[in-house]
Every structure is written in C-alpha cells, then in structure tokens.
Image: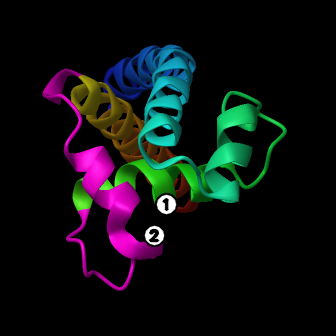
Amino acid sequence: MNSNLAVYLFIALLILTITYVILTYFNSRLYNEVCEQYKNKYGEINPSAISFKYFNFNFIYINMPNEKFKFVYSPLLLRKHSPLNKIDSGKWYEFINTRKTSVKVWFYAELITLLLCMTIFFVLLTCYTVSKTTG
C-alpha cells in the first residue's frame, strides 16, 4: 500500500473516531429522551434499556454495544419478526420506528460512522500485516 494512502486513511480514521465519540455523546442524550417518552407512553421500560440509559456513555460498561444494538439499531435496521430482533412484544420496535425522522437520522449517522471506522481500521490492519509478511 502506498504510504501516502495509509497516512490519509489513518487521518480519516482519527477524524471518524472523534466524530463517533461526539455522536455517541449527543445520542446518549437523545436516547434518554426516547426512553422517557417510552416510559410516559407505556408506563414501564425494559430493565436492560434502563441500564443502557444510565451507562450509555461510559467506556467501562462492557455490555454497551450489545444493548445499543438491541435497543437502537436492531429495531431501525431489522424487520419486526426477525430472529435477531428480540425485543419484548414489539412495543419498543413500533415506538422506535414511529419516532421523527430527525431522531432516527442521528442514530443512523452514529452507526454509519462506526461501520466506516471499523472498515478503515481493518483495511489498515490488513495492509500493515501484508506489508510486514511480504517485505
């Protein structure tokens, strides 16, 4: 791989990582608002969603990506009856998907940024590994 390209990819990775951290921080507030709206509408909220609500922007909380996928990305990306969509009784699924588009766009932006970060990271890792083994 050309060293200039690797530098550009590394800079892009840094910028995307910073963007992801900022989006995660602001989306944690948005998630808290969505949880409050759900609680006001249905009177109760899943205990896992509550734990994610309070530990959303804590890097030490290990289960965060699983809970985030389960309560945010899964209802937005998968169909209601998908086996990966294991949310109780579909209320959360319907609730997330009936939110305003402006709310969902920020969750999509966070997910796309995360996927781009992972892709660039693995491209850089693969290129580094190939360059070390071949030369």
Q: Residue at x 68, y 27 (%)?
A: 57
Occupied quadrant, residue 23: top left
Left/right of residue 19 with respect to residue 32 in the rendered view: left
Q: Give amino acid for label 1.
A: Lys
Secondary structure at badge 1 equals: helix
- Name the residue carrying label 2: 87
Q: Is residue 109 above or below residue 15?
A: below
Structural distance between the alpha carbons of marks 1 and 2: 7 Å
Q: Is residue 29 above or below residue 42?
A: above
Q: Residue at x 45, y 22 (%)?
A: 30
User: Between 121 and 39, which is closer to the camera in this rendering?
Assistant: 39
Q: Closer to the camera: disc 1 or disc 2?
A: 2
Residue 70 numbered mark, or none: 1
Mark 2 burial class by Cα count in 10 Å: few <14, some 14-19, many 20+: some
Occupied quadrant, residue 93: bottom left
Mark 1 burial class by Cα count in 10 Å: few <14, some 14-19, many 20+: some
Residue that sits furthest to the right in the current view? 60
Can residue 74 be seen? no
Left/right of residue 68 with respect to residue 3 in the rendered view: right
Q: Residue at x 42, y 20 (%)?
A: 7
Q: Residue at x 78, y 51 (%)?
A: 62
Left/right of residue 111 with respect to residue 108 in the rendered view: right
Residue range of the region highlighted in magenta in the rendering: 78-102
User: Between 67 and 46, which is closer to the camera in this rendering?
Assistant: 46
Q: Give amino acid for label 2.
A: Ile
